[in-house]
Amino acid sequence: MYKFLARRLLSTIPVLAIVAVLVFLMLRLTPGDPAAILAGDAANTEQIARIREGLGLDRPLPVQFAIWAKSILSGDLGESFYFKMKVTSLIGQRLEATLSLATLTIIFAVFTAVPLGVLAAWRFGGWFDRILMGFSVMGFSVPVFVLAYILIWIVSLKLGWLPVQGYKPIAEGFGPFIRHLILPAITLSVIYIALIARVTRASVLEALGEDYIRTARAKGLPESRVLIRHALTNAAVPIVTVIGIGIALLIGGVVVTESVYAIPGLGRLTVDAVLARDFPTIQGVILFFSVIYVMINLLVDLSYVFFDPRIRY
Amino acid sequence: MAFSRKLAAFAAFATLAAAGVALAQEKVLRIVPHSNLAILDPIWTTAYMSRNHGYMIYDTLFGTDEKNQIKPQMVEEWTASPDKRLWTFKLRKGLEFHDGKAVTSEDVVASIARWGKRDAMGTALMTFVDRMDTPAPDTFRIFLREACGFLLEALGKPSSNVLFIMPKRVADTDAFKQIDDYTGSGPYIFKRDEFKPGDKAVYLRNAKYVPRKEGPSGSAGGKNVYVDRVEWNLALRDAQAQANALVNGEVDVLEAPAFESVEGLKKAANVQILNPAPAGLQYMARFNHLHKPFDNPAVRRAALAAFSQEPFLKAQVGLKEYYRPCASMFTCGTPYGSPAGSDIQSKSNMKKAQELLKSSGYDGTPVLIMKPTDLASIQKLPDVAAQLLRQAGFKVDLQAMDWQTLVGRRSKKDAPDKGGWHMFLTAWQAHDIWNPIANAALDARGEKSGWFGWASDDKLNDLRAQFMRETDDAKKKQLAEAVQARAFEIGTHAPLGEYVQPVAARKNISGFFTTNGNLYWNLKKN
């Protein structure tokens, strides 16, 4: 187990190194000049050149990369061209909003989708199963922004129950914090509910056909215990995998939701940085996302041990 | 012991209650600006958001009132020698920076020097300045090598880059490095610790600010503040979400609601639509003078003849009450606004454009137009330009890209097929183009010129130089007309009409006044 953990942690180093090189090169090779953006609309070519020089963008690419790599190795993601702040500070400022939204979304999604999926498998082919599968197709198909606007119109503008936009840190009170997150989390969770419910249904359905389920029922166990203790537990590995991937995707995939609900999270930061060709921020955020992905995958792999004792590392 | 605990508890409760009452009474003006605020140095960049931030926290020597007249702001009185080469300015009493130190003439001179290295009018002015000195803490003098006709216009210019007065220690920063001390002497104090780019910027009322007695007018007049705190919501950028938030009372002012939202907002019970900046903005098509076919003035004139303004305005703005065709390169309604020399565009038509193109020697080189796909405020203009040029007989290569790619690419002088360009379209606020010096598109010094497109024309440069030296208002007006006529003659660029940007606000917000930008003093929240 510990060897596996050490091996996996070590394997993140080349992954992150490759990501770093690719991101660095891709940004330099795509069109757009951070200096021209920073200088503003009325700046002239000489002023832009001076700013480019100040940012170090006139130096050869290997030199620029070496400077950046050196600062990363010392734990510094560099300073944003655009915001004139440490990239780590920028990420720190935005992390709470994105993590809160992602956590609430995944809680909504898991606590809704897993029971629905189990019930659908239990009543396979019945009306509940069909409705759920229909909902699932809708959940996949409706764009996030359409759903967001519909929810805002009904819940906020017509009923006046929740705010239209914004984010309140938890430090300002749990009430305002949760009120601002409910609509975005529901909006974002729909697609994950659809995905997790389908996977849960398929896995539980497969488990329900196994001999040990027949044995459990033959022993006279209540159906709820058969479903939860025997079927769901044995079907957990693919469900946990999908949830893990969902969490990883959520961290970086909340851009549209953050835009519509004006949540100052990492998604908006990434968009702003890309639009401003803010190389240090884009590089820092992508590296950060990469670390998150790797860690979540590792946690998912480790969780298999608890759900399936046959798995050994 | 028990009594003292109770006393302490009571004291704590009373403090909290008092704080609660104070918070409840605090008037917060919640504004959604037109864009994100990232750069906090309004001299280092010409970005409008940085300029607006500057107006919140800094003061200016002069302002430009709603009638486009230069009026004193920090200056109490000033005199000019008979030969107009020595200007003496005295600061008014009570000027104080946010750190409690008095504003002195040394702060002013340092601020002028830094601004003079970055701003277009500032750099032009500095070519006339021999030296500046500070004979007294409240007095500074500007010695000119020769008389110049735009000194006050430059010191009081209302748009980027505005001459904001900073403490000397800040203004001494290299003009090509951003400042990191945001101490001003303006009506608001910047809350640096609450600033989160992409989220919010916070400004507190500067209780020690002494406003002028006159009423607010443009960037001049009294800057009275009637709210305790102004919050710029930098996260709310989706147009529909902005409108929803205003209707729901979650924000107080939308600085630039989308035109598509305006009709809906007009119907909302608690929302008012205002037009505080009637001078508006002008659309512009800029030619690249370095490369074929727009290195040929006859081809540029053919394009000018094709660019009737109405189609651009209809497509981009749509609502007739918010746009106006304008044949002037200097913004209609401002001192130099005039139709002089504009016949090639204003009285032309497609048939004329086709004839001009045929006789120009145009060789069929496709015109590469850069179209920004992500900037809604100008996004439709390139499509109209492409269609009109095709009708006139041009071959057109309309290339879509994001605005930032466009911004990077337009600074390249390479040939269009090697990463350069032929044409881009943009919009300017009225006061950025309202005279021959400020209007960057009229700088015709070729590759040395101040703005992308690199127009080259000695006669135009000569006329601009005459304008800079002329001190008589009537003659300046004539020279501005001559500059414009020459610019149309050689086709520096094409003005594409003007529009005003409405502001949407909750009905409990009052005190809006005629401005030339986005200025947030004098507003009351009831």
Image (cartoon, coloured by chain):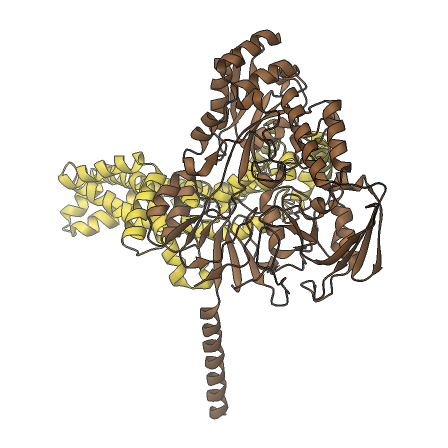
Question: Which residue corresponds to the image point at 45% horizontal and 25% vertical from the top-left?
Answer: B311
Q: In this view, does A135 lie above or below B311?
A: below
Q: Can residue A168 be seen by looking at this rendering?
A: yes
Return the x and y of residue B213 as percentages of the image width and height.
62, 63
Return the x and y of residue A115 as percentages of the image width and height.
25, 48
The reply, left or right, for residue B472 in relation to residue A221 is right
Picture quadrant of residue B493: top right
- Chain A display color: yellow
Q: In this view, does B309 lie above or below B159?
A: above
Near-viewer residue (A72 or A281):
A281
The number of numbered badges drawn on the structure is 0
Q: Which chain is brown?
A: B
Near-viewer residue (A214 or A134):
A134
Q: Is residue B70 above or below residue A12?
A: below
Question: Which residue corresponds to the image point at 39% horizontal and 47% vertical from the top-left?
Answer: B243
Picture quadrant of residue A69: top right
Question: Which residue corresponds to the image point at 47% horizontal and 91% vertical from the top-left?
Answer: B2
Return the x and y of residue B246 as percentages of the image width and height.
40, 51
Question: Which residue corresponds to the image point at 41% horizontal and 40% vertical from the top-left?
Answer: A245
The reply, left or right, for residue A139 in relation to residue B526 is left
The reply, left or right, for residue A207 in relation to residue B420 is left
Return the x and y of residue B359 as percentages of the image width and height.
59, 7
Q: Can residue B491 be seen by looking at this rendering?
A: no
Q: Can you name the residue that lies furthest to the front here? A: B474
Near-viewer residue (B494 or B35):
B494
Q: In this view, does B417 lie above or below B189?
A: above
